[in-house]
């Protein structure tokens, strides 16, 4: 086993498939809990705390629902980040934009701007800089036209946002037989994200999805679109669902 | 048709009208081309096979992938091992290890162990998975495991395997079920009967580096 | 003499009459003639160690495997690393011990009152003597050197083991002065100073 020190530790490169060493000389946005070790003089402070300190940082992170899950690492040194033993890969964006599952983004340079995607649970990075993504197994790149199981979708770049595709045969088989109750729960085969146009789609093996704390905040904020009566009905349904489990 | 190993956790299949694929429901990650999915009840082998499967707890919700295109399969980040069957032998595994296989392969429920029906029932109750699925014919099978499979050759002498770590086996292997003094210390992390699978004969047994089922 | 061999996520122990101790329930396969029996209070070190285990909440259950043949061990598909000890001491989080060869002594050690109150499981097991110890980690271990004037700070949830002449301090993150839920996400960190090596895993417990 190789022993690294502060000099031999990779600089802005993978330590192994599951860990990445950031050469910090300034600031990085890092997902909370992603740091596993560091050398040097580094401070970790909440992005929310930075917002009042530095307008630039606030302008780079334009998503109130994700802000509490992120910190700014500031200082000089080497910071090793990892995520649940998942594969970690770095990507460079040059004046580009890429949308990623929010749970799988674990760090990015301040040259990139983070925005909440219109697709729930995803964020879009815009600008120039390096970012780090975790995935269950190495990332698989495919080109549209392509249909992806939403749970296995890691992100996409350059192509239009996806639309929903419902598998007609699956729906027919499901509705037409008494089996419906048996697979009433979505298994991923009845509904996909449909990608068209030019670009790249990023895939990973599906996972038992980690709870995304931001998703609840997002959906809750959207319930303001409902009338009072509708909101009450939704509440009753959710209570019934919680009691079933 | 063979499965192309995209990485340790994902395989790709080229589906055509002549080569349909049966896969575990929820295992499709994405596809291109004109491909449709159809839920099928239980596993192949006709009504008898299905009833047997339901009784033994070896039933596994499957689906058929038909049409023309290329399809990615994977499941919850588990590792995938592809095993090719040339028609002369068969693969024995637990039904929920089956990620996908050629639709023209035959599957049926098989009961392993020589402990008699009482041991079998007891095994089924304690979830030791003594009812297994036998896959035969010529074609490819993709198996799921926690952390990957390791092949252990069985060559006369015999290998004892923890049932929780057992994934499957090929070849001419006799499987005996035995309880042994001290075995509970060796495998017994949970409750339940402490069994071992005694494999003898000629062939390969696949184990995973974990006692976790998924 | 090599008894323990790591094979990615498996550990093979080739026994020719020796006895090794391994985590209870971790055997996945074996050939030959091997007996397994509960090693009782696996930590060794007698009553004092047992008491400390109770206090620290660290439970390390070991079994004795003896005979001749090859025994294969694994735990939760974690990566296996075998470390050769030649008289030095390895401090390792108890739940990461997979097996130890004969001739090694295990004991439970505290990192002091601070570690106790943090609830971060800072009571570690020390392994001392001449022999081999197999440890498991969620993903391959990363070894980080600590030199005079060059400390390393690690997340307690990623810490697996350490050896050398080092002092360990708990440093609290900014979460104390920030609002709840807006902290750094690393409420405690461990700072290692001195000379030695720290082993971390690319995942958090």
Image: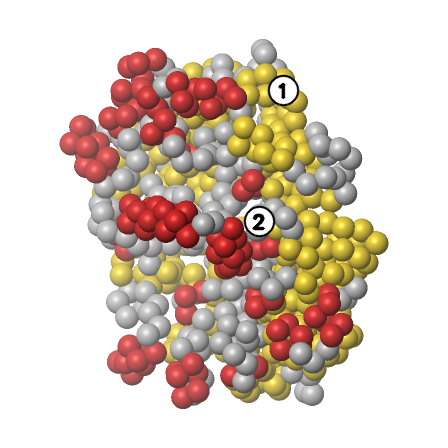
The quadrant of the picture occupied by the C terminus of chain B is top left
Mark number displayed over residue B34: 1
- Asked if residue A243 lies left or right of residue C146, the reply is left
SS of the residue under disc 2: loop
Q: Residue at x 23, y 41 (%)?
A: B126
Residue B158 seen anywhere in this rendered image of the structure: yes
Q: Nearer the viewer, residue C115 or C7?
A: C115
Q: Nearer the viewer, residue C57 or B165?
A: C57
| Chain ID at mark 1 | B
SS of the residue under disc 1: strand
Q: Residue at x 28, y 65 (%)?
A: C39
Q: Nearer the viewer, mark 2 or mark 1?
A: 2
Query: Considering only vertical position in the picture, is A206 above or below B51?
Result: below
Percent position (x, y) of residue A104?
Answer: 60, 54
Whether discs 2 and 1 lie on one chain: the answer is no
Q: Residues within 10 Å of mark 1 (few under 14, many from 20)?
A: few
Q: CA distance from mark 2 to mark 1?
A: 28 Å
Residue situated furthest left in the rendering: B118
- Asked if residue B167 lies left or right of residue A43, the reply is left
The quadrant of the picture occupied by the N terminus of chain B is top right
Residue B109 seen anywhere in this rendered image of the structure: no
Q: Nearer the viewer, residue B51 or C45?
A: B51
Percent position (x, y) of residue B189?
Answer: 30, 54
Query: Considering only vertical position in the picture, is B139 above or below C110?
Result: above
Percent position (x, y) of residue C72?
Answer: 43, 49
Percent position (x, y) of residue A109?
Answer: 75, 64
The residue at which mark 2 appears reads as: A120
| Chain ID at mark 2 | A
């Amino acid at each position: 086993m190789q022993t690294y020190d502060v000099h031999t530790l990779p600089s802005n490169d993978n330590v192994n498939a599951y860990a990445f060493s950031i050469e910090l000389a300034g600031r990085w946005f890092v997902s909370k809990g992603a740091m596993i070790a560091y050398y040097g003089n580094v401070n970790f402070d909440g992005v929310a705390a930075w917002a009042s300190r530095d307008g630039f940082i606030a302008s780079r992170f334009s998503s109130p629902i994700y802000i509490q899950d992120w910190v700014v690492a500031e200082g000089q040194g080497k910071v090793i980040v990892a995520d649940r033993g998942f594969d970690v890969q770095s990507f460079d964006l040059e004046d580009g934009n890429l949308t990623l599952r929010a749970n799988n983004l674990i760090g990015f340079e301040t040259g990139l701007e983070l925005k909440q995607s219109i697709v729930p649970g995803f964020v879009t990075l815009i600008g120039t800089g390096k970012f780090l993504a975790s995935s269950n197994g190495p990332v698989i790149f495919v080109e549209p036209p392509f249909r992806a199981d939403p749970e296995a979708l890691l992100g996409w770049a350059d192509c239009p946002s996806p639309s929903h595709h419902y598998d007609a045969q699956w729906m027919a088989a499901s509705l037409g037989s008494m089996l419906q109750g048996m697979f009433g729960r979505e298994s991923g085969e009845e509904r996909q994200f449909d990608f068209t146009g030019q670009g790249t789609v990023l895939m990973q093996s599906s996972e038992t999805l980690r709870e995304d704390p931001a998703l609840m905040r997002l959906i809750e904020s959207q319930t303001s679109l409902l009338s009072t009566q509708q909101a009450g009905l939704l509440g009753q349904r959710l209570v019934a669902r919680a009691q079933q489990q | 048709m063979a499965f192309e190993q995209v990485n340790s956790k994902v395989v790709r299949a080229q589906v055509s009208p002549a080569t349909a694929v049966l896969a575990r429901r929820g295992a499709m990650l994405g596809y291109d081309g004109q491909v449709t999915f159809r839920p099928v009840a239980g596993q192949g082998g006709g009504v008898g096979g299905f009833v047997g499967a339901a009784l033994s707890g070896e039933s596994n919700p499957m689906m058929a992938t038909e049409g023309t295109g290329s399809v990615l399969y994977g499941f919850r980040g588990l590792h995938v091992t592809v095993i090719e069957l040339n028609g002369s032998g068969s693969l024995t595994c637990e039904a929920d290890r089956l990620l996908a296989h050629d639709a023209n392969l035959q599957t049926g429920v098989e009961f392993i162990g020589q402990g008699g029906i009482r041991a079998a029932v007891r095994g089924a109750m304690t979830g030791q998975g003594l009812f297994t699925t036998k896959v035969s014919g010529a074609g490819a099978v993709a198996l799921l495991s926690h952390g990957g499979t390791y092949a252990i050759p069985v060559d006369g002498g015999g290998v004892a395997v923890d049932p929780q770590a057992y994934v499957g086996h090929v070849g001419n292997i006799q499987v005996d079920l035995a309880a042994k003094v001290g075995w509970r210390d060796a495998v017994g992390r949970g409750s339940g009967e402490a069994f071992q699978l005694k494999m003898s004969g000629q062939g390969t047994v696949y184990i995973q580096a974990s006692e976790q089922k998924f | 003499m090599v008894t323990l061999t790591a094979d990615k996520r498996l550990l093979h122990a080739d026994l020719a009459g020796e006895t090794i101790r391994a985590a209870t329930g971790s055997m996945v396969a074996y050939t030959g003639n091997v007996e397994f029996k509960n090693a009782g209070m696996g930590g060794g070190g007698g009553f004092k160690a047992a008491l400390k285990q109770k206090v620290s909440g660290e439970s390390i259950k070991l079994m004795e495997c003896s005979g001749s043949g090859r025994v294969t061990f694994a735990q939760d598909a974690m990566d296996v690393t075998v470390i050769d000890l030649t008289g030095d001491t390895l401090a390792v989080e108890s739940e990461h011990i997979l097996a130890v060869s004969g001739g090694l002594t295990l004991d439970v050690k505290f990192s002091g009152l601070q570690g106790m109150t943090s609830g971060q499981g800072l009571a570690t097991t020390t392994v001392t003597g001449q022999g081999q110890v197999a440890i498991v980690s969620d993903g391959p271990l990363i070894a980080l050197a600590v030199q005079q004037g060059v400390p390393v700070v690690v997340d307690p949830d990623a810490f697996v083991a350490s050896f050398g002449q080092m002092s360990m301090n708990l440093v609290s993150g900014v979460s104390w002065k920030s609002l709840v839920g807006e902290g750094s996400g690393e409420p405690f960190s461990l700072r290692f100073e001195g000379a030695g090596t720290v082993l971390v895993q690319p995942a958090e417990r």
